[in-house]
């Protein structure tokens, strides 16, 4: 009895960070970083709040911040299940194998994994076509840069990040044939100090527009201090750089979370589902555009976003060669979903190598 009591105390202590006290269903979330990162993890917390607003006390939501991508994720999810979680959302790419491992142990629990590609009878995946948004901000970058040098702070060399770099570059190059991309990989999702250092290095190398695929607002702060431009990542970050902030790619997770939780409640949820939505579906949102962007460019960017949303324009439409000059897409040909999901190459014109 003492052992059971101790376990109960440990579990209740771990999950004091809950948004609601529930009765019908318990839904857990694990985050790779802190909820107050003002970026990726924060936007998932916005999605959690959407669940609470939609279902009230019928659904209890619990979460754990700063869950590393590895064995610790298995421990946290296992504890969530033992605490009564009926459904778990894991929100970072490196949570993929831990999700699959825990799902095997608890076949009656429903699992959702963001940005991954492995599914099971009780595991589905979801991600957004972030590359669509990066095409829009790439166009803006190509138009507003004065130095013709655009910096890009990248996290890990996974297909999602490589897709974004390629998409942004192609759009920037189409808008400005003289543009150059400089990419720095920092091998972390959230480390404000590393992010800031990388941004400073890019600025020293002449970049006057900085893009990022990392989670904090540190780069925006650096850009504001240096007098260059930057973009919000996953969330609006204008409060950290009112002069630097051009716009943001905002992740709209809320509707998806509400939909999937509702399906779990009414018995229509299915595993092995792969969701990959974009601007047209509302999962990728282009934030408010700054007046620092010329009006004509704002219109071009909005027209591009609208055309991508309607399907009239695909960011990866040929002719496009790979970095080594070999043909990839013929004139008018659009990239297939398989190549996009597994993208491991730069397009022609980007310098440097993708780290292994």
Image (tube, helix red, strand yellow):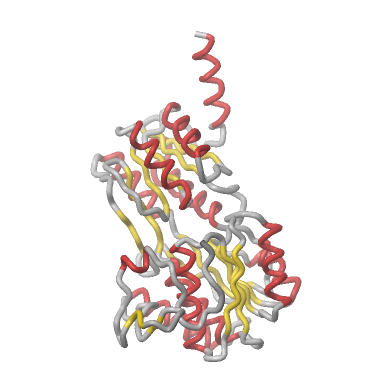
Which image quadrant is residue 89 in? top left
In the image, taking residue 188 as reference, residue 126 lies left or right, namely left
Q: Quadrant of residue 200?
A: bottom right
Give the side of residue 66 with respect to residue 261, left or right. right
Q: Find residue 300 and report its horizontal and vertical position in percent.
A: 47, 86
Q: Residue at x 33, y 35 (%)?
A: 104
Query: Is residue 344 in sight in this rendering?
Result: yes
Which is nearer the eye, 50 or 39?
39
Q: Residue 27: x and y, percent?
A: 42, 38
Residue 317 in percent (x, y) is at 35, 81
Q: Is 338 situated above or below 13?
A: below
Residue at the far right: name it: 225
Relative to 142, residue 1 above or below: above
Task: Write the residue at 38% across / 78% down.
Answer: 316
Frontmost residue, 237 versus 272:
272
Q: Residue furthest top?
A: 1
How many numbered marks, from 0 up? 0
* Residue at the extreme left: 268
273 or 285: which is nearer to us? 273
Viewer can see residue 19: no
Residue 103 placed where, x, y %?
35, 37
Residue sitting at 42 percent across and 55 percent down?
115
Q: Nearer the viewer, residue 49 or 300?
A: 300
């Amino acid at each position: 009895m003492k052992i059971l009591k101790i376990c109960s105390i440990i579990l209740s202590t771990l999950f004091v960070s809950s948004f609601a006290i529930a009765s019908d269903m318990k839904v857990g979330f694990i985050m790779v970083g802190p909820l107050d990162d003002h970026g990726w993890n924060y936007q998932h917390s916005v999605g959690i709040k959407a669940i609470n607003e939609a279902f009230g006390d019928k659904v209890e939501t619990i979460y754990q911040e700063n869950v590393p991508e590895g064995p610790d994720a298995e421990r946290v999810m296992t504890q969530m299940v033992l605490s009564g979680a009926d459904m778990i959302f894991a929100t970072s790419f490196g949570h993929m194998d831990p999700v699959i491992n825990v799902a095997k142990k608890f076949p009656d629990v429903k699992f959702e994994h963001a940005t991954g590609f492995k599914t099971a009878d009780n595991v589905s995946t979801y991600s957004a076509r972030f590359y669509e948004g990066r095409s829009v901000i790439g166009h803006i970058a190509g138009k507003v840069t004065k130095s013709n040098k655009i910096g890009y702070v990248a996290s890990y060399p996974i297909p999602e990040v490589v897709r974004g770099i390629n998409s942004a570059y192609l759009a920037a190059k189409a808008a400005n044939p003289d543009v150059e991309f400089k990419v720095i990989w920092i091998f972390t999702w959230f480390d404000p100090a590393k992010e800031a250092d990388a941004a400073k290095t890019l600025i020293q190398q002449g970049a006057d527009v900085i893009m990022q695929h990392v989670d904090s607002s540190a780069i925006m702060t650096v850009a504001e201090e240096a007098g260059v431009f930057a973009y919000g990542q996953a969330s609006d970050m204008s409060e950290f750089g009112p002069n630097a902030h051009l716009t943001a790619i905002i992740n709209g997770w809320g509707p998806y979370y509400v939909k999937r939780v509702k399906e779990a409640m009414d018995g229509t949820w299915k595993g092995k589902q792969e969701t990959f939505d974009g601007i047209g579906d509302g999962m990728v949102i282009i934030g408010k555009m700054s007046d620092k962007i010329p009006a004509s460019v704002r219109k071009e960017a909005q027209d591009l976003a609208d055309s991508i949303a309607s399907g009239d324009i695909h960011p990866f439409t040929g002719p496009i060669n790979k970095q080594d000059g070999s043909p990839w897409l013929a004139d008018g040909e659009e990239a297939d979903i398989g190549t996009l999901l597994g993208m491991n190459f730069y397009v022609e014109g980007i310098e440097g190598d993708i780290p292994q």
